[in-house]
Amino acid sequence: MSIRPVILIVPLISLGPAQAAPLATYSCPAGTAGPHAAGVVLPTGMKSATGNPARDLHRVVLSDPAAICNDGSPGVYYVRPGTTDPDKWHIHLMGGFSCTDEASCAERWCGDASGGASLSELMSSDWTPDAAFFNGFADGSPRWGAANPLDGWTQVVVYYCGSDMHRGRAGATTLGGMDLDFAGGHILEATLRDLQTGTVAVDTDGDGLDESVPDLDYATHVLLSGSSAGGVGAAQQADRIRGALRATNPEVPFRVVVDAAIIPKLQNWLTPAEAETVWTGFYNDQSVWLADTDDSCLAANASDPWRCEDAGFVVKTALATPVFVRSDLLDFLLFDGVDAVVQDAGYAAITEADYASYMADRLDEIATTVVSSNGVAAGAYGPMCRRHVGITREDAALFQLMEDPGVQLTFVDAVYDWMIGTGLNYSQLVDDYAVAEADTLSPSFLWLDSCPY
């Protein structure tokens, strides 16, 4: 069985005047909804401010001219100074798909031909509110008495508006009839630089007085995380960020959580040559971003850099940073993506049973073989609840339970124990239910206590 050849057309970066239209004036195809006209439109995982200082994060607008969204609006991030543990930091990279050519970026900006809503809020900061609430790890006052051991930490969310997995360095780019910027890597870098100045302040309680945000250079712990597209960015950027932070704070413990970004090995369904063709296509498509990719991985795979587009491969073979991975064994979104790739190669549709089993195998492989440069073993959390992201979902982060010998742990508890150490001797939690029966079982039947939604 052979896979259909991938035709790689890499759009050119514009070096001079072009007839393409910037996003603000781009003519959307007939039948599409078009970009949001006005008002606040919030992406998945981000909610309207609650007015509770313990829950809300506050917007900071970046002044670096290179740190801009797809439409040229300034990059932004959200921050809440810590309370009980202000020098412990959690920095999260938002997710939300990506685009690499005019067709995919136009659909992202305009919506699809059936009139579906656009994702223009993920290409601009124009819709971002002054304050917002993020579920999960950043929630300092969760509902129903749920515990969040990160609630007193300084919380940062890097807003995703570059469509490039927080990796882009290309800047101004022309894709057919569209002009836009790919600068997610610049936004991430500028955010960290801003937080290292010790001069950032936000009004956390609405009294008109700004409260200082701690200086990142004096952090005692830093946890980087990312979900979905942000999870790929976290994996690719972790060692680079670790190096930048340790240049001024050499001993700071720095770790990364990669959420909803790793898939089973494609070789479970495709031949090695077919899998190479798929990953080469992804790697070349994303070259339009001038994307940051893990340096160690590229150096070790100079003749086949496509391997480094697979976040699972980077985590398994290249990261010096201690890493914790979470993937739902039946992630509906990643399942559909893998199924499309396999069927596009001419094979039959994949089964949930196979996907869950192969995903568990990959998490087990990472958790049992990956050890960071400073001797920290990788962690893994693999529920089977047919959900995508975990970090910014209240239920998946704070309520879903999985069992380590003698104790039940939520996702955030498992990460905290792995990061700080709580005496639970946590290693890995991957659902060992009879995944071979996943095709015939209802979601509610799978680990009733671990899927509370």
Image (tube, rainbow, N blue to C red):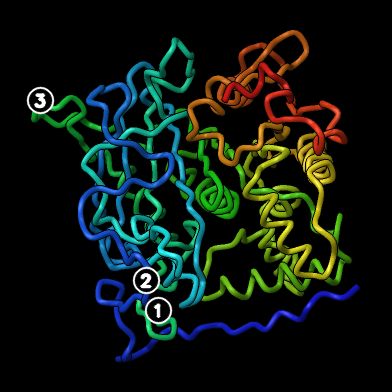
Percent of width and height locating residue 207: 10, 25
Residue carrying label 3: 207
Question: Which label sits on residue 173?
Answer: 1
Q: Residue at x 68, y 65 (%)?
A: 298
Q: Which residue occupies the extreme left position in the image?
A: 208
Q: Is residue 102 left or right of residue 6?
A: left
Callout 2 amino acid: Asp
* Lower position in the chain sequence, tag 1 or tag 2: 1
Percent of width and height locating residue 315: 69, 48
Using the numbered discs, state the Cα–Cα distance from disc 3 to disc 1 in whole angstroms. Answer: 42 Å
Callout 1 amino acid: Thr
To which quarter of the image does residue 297 belong? bottom right
Quadrant of the snapshot with the N terminus: bottom right
Asked if labels 2 and 1 touch by Cβ distance under 8 angstroms, the answer is yes
Which is more toward the observer, 39 or 94? Answer: 39
Percent of width and height locating residue 240: 53, 53
Which is more toward the observer, 382 or 113? Answer: 113
Q: Residue at x 76, y 74 (%)?
A: 303
Neighbour class for label 1 at 10 Å: few (<14), some, many (≥20)?
many
Using the numbered discs, state the Cα–Cα distance from disc 3 to disc 2 in whole angstroms. Answer: 37 Å
Which is more toward the observer, 423 or 33? Answer: 33
Callout 3 amino acid: Asp
Q: Secondary structure at mark 1?
A: strand
Neighbour class for label 2 at 10 Å: few (<14), some, many (≥20)?
many
* Res. 238 in view: no
Percent of width and height locating residue 305: 70, 69
Q: Is residue 224 left or right of residue 128?
A: right
Q: Is residue 115 left or right of residue 442?
A: left
Which is more toward the observer, 33 or 177? Answer: 33
Up-down: is 321 above or below 185?
above
Question: Which label sits on residue 181?
Answer: 2
Neighbour class for label 3 at 10 Å: few (<14), some, many (≥20)?
few
